């Protein structure tokens, strides 16, 4: 059987002062644990050597409350060399923000590996405001497994000993993997070390009594262990308070706490001695200083505020026989006392996960007539429903109203089990559900259908009640039981559609209502279970979840419940698509359309996701259930977003994107137009200079002309010469075209776009004469470095094409005494008139 394995830390990559890795070798509430150095480099490593070669079954690790690693990897090996280690896996740890960095996370990992050494690779820490030095802290580490040379604390039972139930020392029937709660890390970290040792010794005595079938002694030991666990917790808290007072140098408080611990511990030992439990625990019945036996110690006089009316450790009363027998199909409640399964008894169980361990409700050990500063009744603070008059080991009696309400269930399962389900103590309620789980899972196939149906319906009755329970552990147990019924019990016994419909129809409304609770854990668990339930074979076959999920809800429904309803239907459509007659476009759009009118934005957003999902599946059929897509409808932001989403799904641009695109194009066009105007202005200025130069040359020629002819013949020409400047203003000086529109601006436009003797350079946007275009590309253009002159035709050719152009020899060779046109690549005569006739012909 697996048990706690001792170990020693043989290596670490670093440790903070006062928080060495060797601290992990000890486990108690006051151990400071191991911390990495400040601002260290991650990952950090720990090497652990177990006391013997071990088959490791379980690893447990308790992290610091704010020095939390993000990830830890586990390796097992036969020696310290790196090659011998084999990777087992890794765990992630929560950043602990939800608890305000006031709780520690306990991680348990179940493995099956052989080795002598363990290596822990600790990765970087979660960042928070308390962890100023980026450290990681591990408070405790625990190894549980089977040592190769392990010997049981008891000798094997001889062949002559009667042991019909095959009890083992661990108190389990045929359970080789049973792990004692005393070996759990949570036990050591919450218990006073001295009391923990007593508990372990009493547990061994209890197991011996079980093997000897001395059940009265075993029951007394069990009750003593349960009471001592609370005592150990209280003493551990006193010890922590004392150490905290010492750290703050409040020595008066530390002395007071020490005195409280000694007095409380003395009273506990006196009660143990009173019921002859000290000898069972192997402790001498004397005070720690050995002066006198505990029986002879004079009890301190109680203060007026402290009157103890019951013993601290009290033997559990004998249970009264049940008023009615259970059906023969299932094991009666009395026979389950000796069963090792936790579902076989309704006594509170010790919880080992840190969250549940802190939340557990423990029956009171002491009744107080007056407040006791030393023996505080914490159950009164934790559980307002606590009823001290009820026996600590049995659920309280049911009221007449409850008995009438659950009469049919009592007929099936018996009063003791149903009393646990109706108990005000949550652990009894959980144990009752777990007991029903075991009963149904072990039901034989030979039983009649009527009895099976009665048990199913009785279980559904308890599940409906447990689903409404505020304690998450009870609610979780009800989900497990419901899953067993739908997945295993109904198909196994072939109970058919009627019972499946009954189970789902009676529980699903409560589950849906549960999704509206404020507790996030219960709400998420309900949604996830409904999602899983929809995949169960018989539930999916009859579309039972979809039938409950598709009806529209009122617009004034609570936000959390409405959001959960929408999320459930969204998951159904995502998982199954359209499945008539329930999951159709009509049912989905009616539901989503109603949800769009809800006051919560998150609900409307979730409904929009359903609409988009249906549009991907069914296309334009969805639009029939929405208002028309026009400007009036699009004024509503909600429908505008929906129709824009349709466009995106279809691969189109939305109206807003189209509008933005048009605006961008208009802006780009305007920018180009402004750029062209600026370029035009610069070119026009050059042309104006050229125009002035030509005009000046013509005026000089007019002064050197021969004498004018006779007056009667020369009067018209003379008038023309006098108005030569006016004549040039309405004419292009390059092509000779005349137009009244050739004002200053008109000529600019003509030069830029229409004059056949001018050409705009494609590379620098400058306007030049066609006759000088090749020279411009070779000497003036901004990209002149990219051109070269062909030695044959004298044209400007891009350098990338020049070699091929020359090699082809297809160009027209330039000839002396002729010009070469860069547009048609032909030779023409020299002179302006030749260019005009060539370009304008």
Image (cartoon, helix red, strand yellow):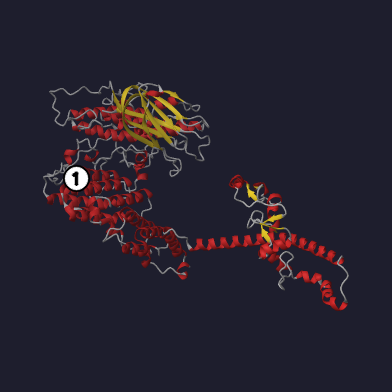
State the quadrant of the N terminus. top left
Q: Position of residue 633 (x, y in %)?
A: 45, 69
Above or below residue 456? Residue 39 is above
Observer-nearest of 384 and 119:
119
Under circle 1, the secondary element is helix
Q: Residue at x 41, y 24 (%)?
A: 82
Relative horizontal placement of residue 722, taking residue 790 as reference (left or right): right
Q: Nearer the viewer, residue 698 or 767?
A: 698
Tell me residue 322's x, y (percent): 16, 44
- Judge left or right: residue 176 versus residue 248: left
The answer to whether residue 756 is visible is no
Name the residue that disc number 1 marks: 440
**Residue 603, above or below 417:** below
Which quadrant of the structure image shows residue 737? bottom right
Q: Residue at x 25, y 48 (%)?
A: 483
Name the residue nearer the viewer: 604 or 840: 840
């Amino acid at each position: 059987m697996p048990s706690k394995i001792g170990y020693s830390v043989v290596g670490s990559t670093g440790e903070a002062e006062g928080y060495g890795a060797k601290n992990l070798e000890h486990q108690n509430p006051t151990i400071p644990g191991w911390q990495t150095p400040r601002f260290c480099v991650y990952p950090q490593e720990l090497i652990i050597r177990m006391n013997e070669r071990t088959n490791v079954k379980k690893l447990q690790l308790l992290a610091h409350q704010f020095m939390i690693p993000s990830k830890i990897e586990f390796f097992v090996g036969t020696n310290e060399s790196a090659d011998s280690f084999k990777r087992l896996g890794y765990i992630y740890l929560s950043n602990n923000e939800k608890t305000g960095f006031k709780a520690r996370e306990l991680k348990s990992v179940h493995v099956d590996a052989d080795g002598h050494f363990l290596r822990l690779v600790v990765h970087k820490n979660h960042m928070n405001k308390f962890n100023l030095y980026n450290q990681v802290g591990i408070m405790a580490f625990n190894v549980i497994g089977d040592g190769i040379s392990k010997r049981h604390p008891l000798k094997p039972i001889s062949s002559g000993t009667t042991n019909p139930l095959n009890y083992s020392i661990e108190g389990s029937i045929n359970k080789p993997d049973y792990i004692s709660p005393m070996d759990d890390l949570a036990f050591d970290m919450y218990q006073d070390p001295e009391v923990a040792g007593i508990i372990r010794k009493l547990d061994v005595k209890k197991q011996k009594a079980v093997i000897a079938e001395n059940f009265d002694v075993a029951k007394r030991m069990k009750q003593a262990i349960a009471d001592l666990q609370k005592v150990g917790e209280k003493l551990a808290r006193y010890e922590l308070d004392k150490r905290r007072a010492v750290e703050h140098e409040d020595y008066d408080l530390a002395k007071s706490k020490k005195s409280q611990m000694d007095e409380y511990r003395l009273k506990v030992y006196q009660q143990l001695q009173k019921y002859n439990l000290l000898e069972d625990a192997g402790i001498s019945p004397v005070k720690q200083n050995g002066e006198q036996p505990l029986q002879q110690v004079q009890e301190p006089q109680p203060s007026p505020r402290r009157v103890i009316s019951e013993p601290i450790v009290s033997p559990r009363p004998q249970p009264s026989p049940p008023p009615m027998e259970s059906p023969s199909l299932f094991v009666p409640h009395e026979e389950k006392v000796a069963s090792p399964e936790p579902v076989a008894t309704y006594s509170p169980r010790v919880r080992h996960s840190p969250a549940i361990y802190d939340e557990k409700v423990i029956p009171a050990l002491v009744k107080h007539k007056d407040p006791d500063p030393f023996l505080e009744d914490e159950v009164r603070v934790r559980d307002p429903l606590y009823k001290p008059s009820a026996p600590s080991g049995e659920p309280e009696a049911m009221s007449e109203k409850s008995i009438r309400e659950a009469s049919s269930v009592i007929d099936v399962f018996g009063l003791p089990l149903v009393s646990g389900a109706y108990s005000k103590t949550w652990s009894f309620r959980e144990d009752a559900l777990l007991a029903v789980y075991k009963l149904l899972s072990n039901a034989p196939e030979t039983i009649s259908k009527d009895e099976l149906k009665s048990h199913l319906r009785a279980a559904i009755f308890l599940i409906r009640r447990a689903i409404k329970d505020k304690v998450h552990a009870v609610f979780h147990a009800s989900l497990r039981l419901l899953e067993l019924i739908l997945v295993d019990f109904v198909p196994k016994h072939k109970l058919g559609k009627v019972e499946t419909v009954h189970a789902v129809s009676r529980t699903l409304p409560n589950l849906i209502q549960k999704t509206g609770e404020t507790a996030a854990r219960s709400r998420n668990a309900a949604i996830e279970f409904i999602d899983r339930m929809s995949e169960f074979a018989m539930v999916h076959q009859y579309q039972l979840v979809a039938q409950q999920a598709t009806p529209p809800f009122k617009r004034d429904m609570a936000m959390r419940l409405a959001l959960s309803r929408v999320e459930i239907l969204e998951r159904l459509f995502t998982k199954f698509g359209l499945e008539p007659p329930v999951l159709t476009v009509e049912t989905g759009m009616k539901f989503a359309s109603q949800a769009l009118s809800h006051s919560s934005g998150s609900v409307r957003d979730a409904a929009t996701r359903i609409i988009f999902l249906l549009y991907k599946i069914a296309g334009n059929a969805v639009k029939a259930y929405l208002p028309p897509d026009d400007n009036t409808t699009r004024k509503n932001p909600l429908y505008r977003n929906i129709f824009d989403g349709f466009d995106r799904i279809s691969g189109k641009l939305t109206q807003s994107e189209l509008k933005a695109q048009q605006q961008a194009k208009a802006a780009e066009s305007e920018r180009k137009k402004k750029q062209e105007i600026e370029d035009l202005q610069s070119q026009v200025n050059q042309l104006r200079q050229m125009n002035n130069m030509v005009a000046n040359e013509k005026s000089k020629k007019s002064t050197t002309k021969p004498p004018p002819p006779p007056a009667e013949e020369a009067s018209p020409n003379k008038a023309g010469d006098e108005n030569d400047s006016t004549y040039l203003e309405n004419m292009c000086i390059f092509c000779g075209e005349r137009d009244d529109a050739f004002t200053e601006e008109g000529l600019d436009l003509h030069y830029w776009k229409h004059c056949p003797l001018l050409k705009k350079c494609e590379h620098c946007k400058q306007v030049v004469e066609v006759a000088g275009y090749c020279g411009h590309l070779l000497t003036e253009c901004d990209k002149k470095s990219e051109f070269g002159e062909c030695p044959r035709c004298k044209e400007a050719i891009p350098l990338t094409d020049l070699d091929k152009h020359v090699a082809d020899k297809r160009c027209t060779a330039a000839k002396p005494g002729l010009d070469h046109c860069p547009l048609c690549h032909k030779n023409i005569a020299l002179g302006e008139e030749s260019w005009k006739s060539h370009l304008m012909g």
